[in-house]
Image (cartoon, helix red, strand yellow):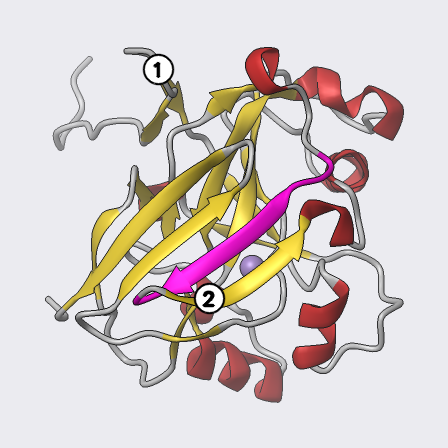
């Protein structure tokens, strides 16, 4: 048997301080998971978690140059801790969720905010706002075997050297284990799945030439430069 078109590489991200890579299957993202960000997006502070997906092919492993995407005039960063799933499961107990985690990274949930808003206004899907080329920069992953399971630590973003986002992982509305428990009621989680665990307040637009430097203390850092559209 042959494939009638050439096969592509499985998307993957590096594992820090190693030559190994983590193959990526799906990217789940939680919405409005920090109180102050939920307020800035118009939430009331009490809603259940909700998720959307990005294609694994939108990964920008290790950061670097990211092209300004088409059909937007309001292209935003959202700094997030990324959770990498190594052991799948259904209806995972939050108390045992950490056993399903390989490690952690720093990601940017890049967003065409105007297209996302258009989707919200018309009750349409968010895909065009959230899932597009190069929409998911992600740092190298650091194994939980090395750092444990961070529930505290500063998450931050500097844009052209100026602080734009700064909060603590403990400000999450739904903790990482709670997110895994909730998500695994709806999906069979699989090894290779990533979860972008939400962004704090301070999201905003970027344009070509801008430099973003994001990090989660104790986990890692990610640098992205926005370059002109293709
Ligand atoms: Mn997000």
Q: Nearer the viewer, residue 148 or 69?
A: 148
Contact between marks 1 and 2 (CB within 8 A): the answer is no
User: What secondary structure is found at the residue carrying circle 2?
Assistant: strand
> Eyeballing the image, is 44 above or below 31?
below
Magenta span covers which residues? 151-160
| Residue 171 part of the magenta segment | no
Q: Position of residue 56 (x, y in %)?
A: 39, 41
Q: Nearer the viewer, residue 116 or 165?
A: 165
Residue appearing at x 35%, y 15% in the figure = 17
Within 10 angstroms of label 2, few (less than 14), some, or many (20 or more) residues? some
Within 10 angstroms of label 1, few (less than 14), some, or many (20 or more) residues? few
Q: Nearer the viewer, residue 225 or 182?
A: 225
Q: Nearer the viewer, residue 164 or 200?
A: 164
Per the image, the residue denoted by label 1 is 17
Q: Position of residue 84 (x, y in %)?
A: 55, 28
Taking the image as drawn, is residue 172 in sight?
no
> Eyeballing the image, is 64 above or below 97?
below
Query: Would residue 180 be found to the left or right of residue 95 on screen?
Result: left
Q: Which mark is residue 142?
A: none
Q: Position of residue 94 (x, y in %)?
A: 85, 30
Query: Would residue 70 be found to the left or right of residue 59 on screen?
Result: left
- Real-space Cα separation, disc 1 to disc 2, in angstroms: 28 Å
Query: Would residue 105 be found to the left or right of residue 36 on screen?
Result: left
Per the image, the residue denoted by label 2 is 163
Q: Position of residue 19 (x, y in %)?
A: 28, 11
Disc nearer the start of the sequence (1/2):
1
Residue appearing at x 20%, y 30% in the figure = 8
Which quadrant of the figure has residue 93? top right
> Eyeballing the image, is 125 above or below 83?
below
Taking the image as drawn, is residue 121 in sight?
yes
Q: Quadrant of the N terminus?
A: top left
Secondary structure that dominates the magenta span:
strand
């Amino acid at each position: 048997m042959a494939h009638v078109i050439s096969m592509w590489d499985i998307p993957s991200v590096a594992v820090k301080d190693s030559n190994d890579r983590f193959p990526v299957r799906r990217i789940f993202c939680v919405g409005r998971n920090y109180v102050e960000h939920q307020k800035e997006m118009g939430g009331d502070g009490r809603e259940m978690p909700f998720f959307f997906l990005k294609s694994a092919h939108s990964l920008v492993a290790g950061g670097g140059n990211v092209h300004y995407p088409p059909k937007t005039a309001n292209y935003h960063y959202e700094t997030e801790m990324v959770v990498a799933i190594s052991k799948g499961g259904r209806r995972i107990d939050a108390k045992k969720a950490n056993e399903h985690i390989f490690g952690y990274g720093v990601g940017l949930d890049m967003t065409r905010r105007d297209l996302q808003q258009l989707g919200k206004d018309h009750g349409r899907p968010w895909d065009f706002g959230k899932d597009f080329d190069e929409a998911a920069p992600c740092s190298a992953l650091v194994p939980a075997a090395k750092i444990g399971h961070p529930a505290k630590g500063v998450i931050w973003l500097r844009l052209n050297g100026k602080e734009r986002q700064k909060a603590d992982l403990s400000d999450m509305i739904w903790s990482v284990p709670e997110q895994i428990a909730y998500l695994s009621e709806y999906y069979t989680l699989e090894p290779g799945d990533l979860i972008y665990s939400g962004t704090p307040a301070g999201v905003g637009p970027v344009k070509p030439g801008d430099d973003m430097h994001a990090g989660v203390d104790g986990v890692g850092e990610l640098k992205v430069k926005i370059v002109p559209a293709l």
